[in-house]
Image: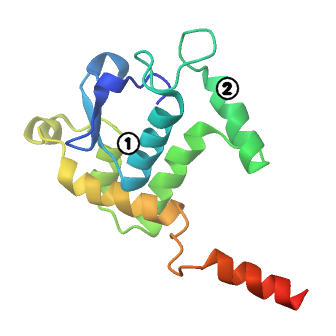
């Protein structure tokens, strides 16, 4: 994520393609983007505009440092957490609550199939099946949107009358 570049984001296909050079498997990793991920990217784009290659540039022109992300996470969550802990939490959710088949969970994490025979026969990436997994994970992690429409002026009048 720290090395994500705008040209890797396919807005039409709703995917992020991490190039092989930045993966442990030395293969492109296609990540289906959930509605939450797309909204976050749109917000980043609107806040700072696309001024350079990196989605999350550092203050000195390069990319963010992993320690920057770590400090941000720990401050926001007010506890000792790690970025890798999110990958672990995702994997636990897949097995325990998401009812996600093992091969989809592992593919979502870009884990290489260790069995050479299985790897030889499994050449595709199940992007559309993983899209459902990523959206389910997003729905699990993000609070639901409010369903009640509130008339702010009416609330203000009620509060003023009650006071």
Percent position (x, y) of residue 133? 33, 58
Q: Residue 9 is drawn in which quadrant?
A: top left
Marks 1 & 2, CB-CB < 8 Å contact = no
Left or right: 44 with respect to 27? right
Number of labelled discs? 2
- Looking at this view, name the residue that lies furthest to the bottom: 162
Secondary element at tag 2: helix
* The C terminus - image quarter: bottom right
Q: Residue at x 71, y 82 (%)?
A: 155
For this orientation, the residue located farthest to the right is 163
Q: Residue at x 56, y 9 (%)?
A: 61
Helix, strand, or loop for circle 1? loop
The residue that mark 2 highlights is 68
Residue 102: tell me if it is visible: yes
Tag nearer the camera, 1 or 2:
2
Residue at which label 1 appears: 109
**Against 99, is 46 above or below?**
above
- Residue drawn at x 18%, y 42% as measured from the top left: 125
Percent across and percent down for residue 123 are 11, 38
Identify which residue, 38 or 27, lies in the foreground. 38
Residue 18 shows up from this direction: no
Q: Earlier in the sequence, mark 1 or mark 2?
A: 2
Left or right side of 44 for 58:
right
Q: CA distance from mark 1 to mark 2?
A: 22 Å
Relative to 44, does residue 39 appear above or below in the rendering?
below
Relative to 7, is 75 above or below?
A: below
């Amino acid at each position: 994520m720290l090395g994500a570049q705008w040209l890797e984001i396919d807005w039409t296909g709703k995917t992020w393609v991490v190039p092989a050079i930045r993966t442990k498997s030395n293969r492109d990793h296609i990540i289906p983007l959930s509605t939450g991920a797309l909204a976050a990217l749109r917000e980043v784009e609107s806040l700072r505009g696309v001024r350079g290659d990196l989605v999350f540039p550092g203050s000195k022109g390069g990319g963010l440092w992993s320690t920057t992300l770590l400090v941000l996470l720990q401050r926001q969550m007010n506890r000792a957490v790690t970025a890798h802990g999110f990958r672990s939490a995702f994997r636990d959710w897949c097995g325990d609550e998401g009812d996600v088949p093992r091969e989809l969970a592992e593919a979502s994490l870009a884990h290489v199939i260790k069995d050479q025979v299985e790897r030889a026969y499994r050449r595709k990436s199940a992007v559309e099946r993983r899209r459902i997994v990523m959206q389910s994970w997003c729905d699990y992690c993000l609070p639901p949107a409010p369903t009640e429409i509130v008339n702010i002026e009416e609330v203000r009048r009620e509060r003023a009358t009650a006071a």
